[in-house]
Image (tube, rainbow, N blue to C red):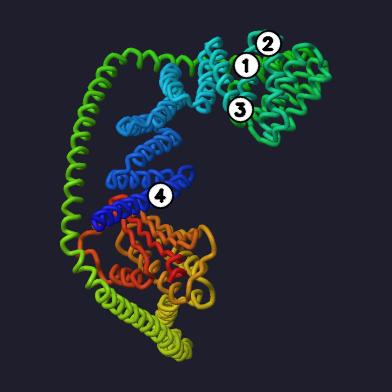
Amino acid sequence: MKIKLAILVLLFVIIKLNAQNDSIYLKNLFDRAYNYEQTKPDSALFLYNKIIKLANKTQIPIFEAKANNYKGIVFSDIGKYDSAVFYYNKSIAIFKIINNEKGIAANLINIGNTFQLQGELKNSVSYYLDGIAIYENLKDDFRLSISYGNLATIFDDINQKEDAKNSLWKSNKFAKKVNDSVQLVYNHYNLTDLYFDEGIIDSAFVNLEKAKKYLNNSSNNHLKYLVSYGEARYFIEVNKLEQALIISKKALGYVEQTKNPYYLALTYSLVGKVYFKQKKYSEALKETHKGLEIAKKYNSKANLIKINSQLSSIYSQINENKKALFYKNLQYKYKDTVLNEKQKKNINFFNIKYQTEKKDKEIIQQQLQLEKKESELQIKKTQTNYLIGLSIFLIVASILAWFLFQQRQKRKNQEIVTLKREHQIKTLESLIEGEEKERFRIAKELHDGVNGDLSAIKYKLSTLLEMNNTVIKEAITMIDNSCSQVRAISHNLVPPSLDNFNLIEAVEEYCEKSDSSHTQKITFQHLGNHLEMSKKEEINVFRIIQELVTNSIKHAKATEINVQISCRNKIVQITVEDNGVGFDVHNADNKGVGLNNIQSRVGYLHAKLDVISNRLGTSTTIEIDKNKDDSN
């Protein structure tokens, strides 16, 4: 009975450890993909696809759902909104299967953001409200405060001012619960802005005072700017122009630190407005023109309308009527542009509305298919659980049958394995040392022997140049080329940088030379801590990288090759990736001398080798755990 219990516990621990290892590997892939999102979106999408396949294979659906969500975010960032919505919906389907409501809500909000970017604001509101409904059911006060705050800006854009104010009040309620002072400052500033637009100055002032209260001693320059900008507007409204000038310049100081072009143009215009009210027209023109230049540079139409209107008023006041008319015409021009854009958005909205019934039917059909697939998946899951239970029972029965015999043989087998391992290590070490010595010998002979002979021949031929013989000149040129090739072969066999410097410098130099001498773009990246490796280990790692880069150049038809070495917590990870045609890693015919060489060196390093190859390219990862060396 005790033996049965011990075996069951052992099986449980093994399954648990495998699941943990899979999760750690997937998290590492997530980190790499996230770092690529802004700079290399294609690489990020490639890694998220890899995560989806592995998560599906290892049955970790939470990672599959998150990877689809992040794919949607990448597509949204690069302006492919239809693809973004497609992957958000895929993520929602998986989150529904695993009953993760928070994940469903996050994707609905993301879809709402995508529609907002497309100008489909009605659809955006609909998805936001669906996401908010889930957050309310979960009582997630933090996300409710943020979601209601964002929803208010959409209502403001479609001129539903009362709905915007209601959303901000709701956001305040939840922000107070979680003590989110930053959100409270934003909300009260936005309420201030809404009341200013409606001309309700007293309510604007009340909300401005509340924003100042929640600001306290915050170091956030953008929040300080918003509150200062609101104060300056208030002092202009109540005709306290000296105070308005002081506060508007204070706001300008904050926004110059944040370097936000939209607010910078707006604030220069505000300072100009104060000077205009004070009848200091030259100062007013100077500050307003500063705002105009920034607004023109970043094509901020909302600011261009306001600033051109203000310039027209100033020039009219100083009787420069031609200029006043010029800026008034510019104001109308930008107004017409904005109206045309709004009309286009309205046309798109009505076209979408016209096709709603057809789309609703398609959605219902998709939901039915999804429910059918969920039912099938549940049946398969149940069958799988039964099979797993039966398999465990059979494994336990089998283990009990030979457990006693195994215990007797265990020590002898262990001794045999240890001896074999030691023999393999010594054999590999001898082979590798022999290979490096042979490389050194050949390189020395090439450099000292063949290269010397070629130089001597060149010298003798040079003495005949007085004959002005073209053939001799060509022969000398050929000898020069041969000398360069011999020198390159000699350096490739025994790179001087590997003897004189460390592995990182050697690999960096090798990649730079390879990049300059081949058509492919070859880059190198080092991440993490300093590497602590023996010279033998460094040589083996260098040879592995050299072999992988050579394979990509010769066989992969790649245009880009990326070499990366990272070291964190004494785990060294070497990655070589290309965007070539790939190959079948399971086909024995593809495993030539080069790959066998790599596998031998990986075995010597006690490392893990992972090769993933498809039509998008090949990714080879070698992981060396230096913690194991310490424990040994």
Q: Which mark is residue 179?
A: 3
Point out the tag, 1 or 4, that comes first from the N-terminus.
4
Q: Is residue 603 left or right of residue 566?
A: left
Point out the tag, 2 or 3, that comes first from the N-terminus.
3
Quarter where residue 281 is shown: top right
Q: Is residue 392 left or right of residue 340?
A: left
Q: Secondary structure at mark 4?
A: helix
Q: Are marks 2 and 1 in contact (CB under 8 Å)?
A: yes
Report crowding for label 1: few under 14, some 14 to 19, many 20 or more residues within 10 A (C-alpha).
many
Residue that label 2 marks: 203
Point out the tag, 1 or 3, that comes first from the N-terminus.
3
The type of residue carrying mark 2 is: Ser
Q: Which mark is residue 29?
A: 4
Q: Are marks 1 and 4 in contact (CB under 8 Å)?
A: no
Q: Secondary structure at mark 2?
A: helix
Query: Which callout, 4 or 3, points to the residue nearer the camera?
Result: 3
Point out the tag, 2 or 4, that comes first from the N-terminus.
4
Q: Which mark is residue 295?
A: none
Q: Residue at x 27, y 47 (%)?
A: 57
Report crowding for label 2: few under 14, some 14 to 19, many 20 or more residues within 10 A (C-alpha).
some
Q: Residue at x 81, y 24 (%)?
A: 246
Residue that label 1 marks: 191
Quarter where residue 118 is shown: top left
Label 1 to label 4: alpha-carbon separation: 43 Å
Label 2 to label 3: alpha-carbon separation: 23 Å
Q: Residue at x 25, y 76 (%)?
A: 412
Residue 323 point in image, percent of width and height? 71, 18
Label 4 to label 3: alpha-carbon separation: 35 Å
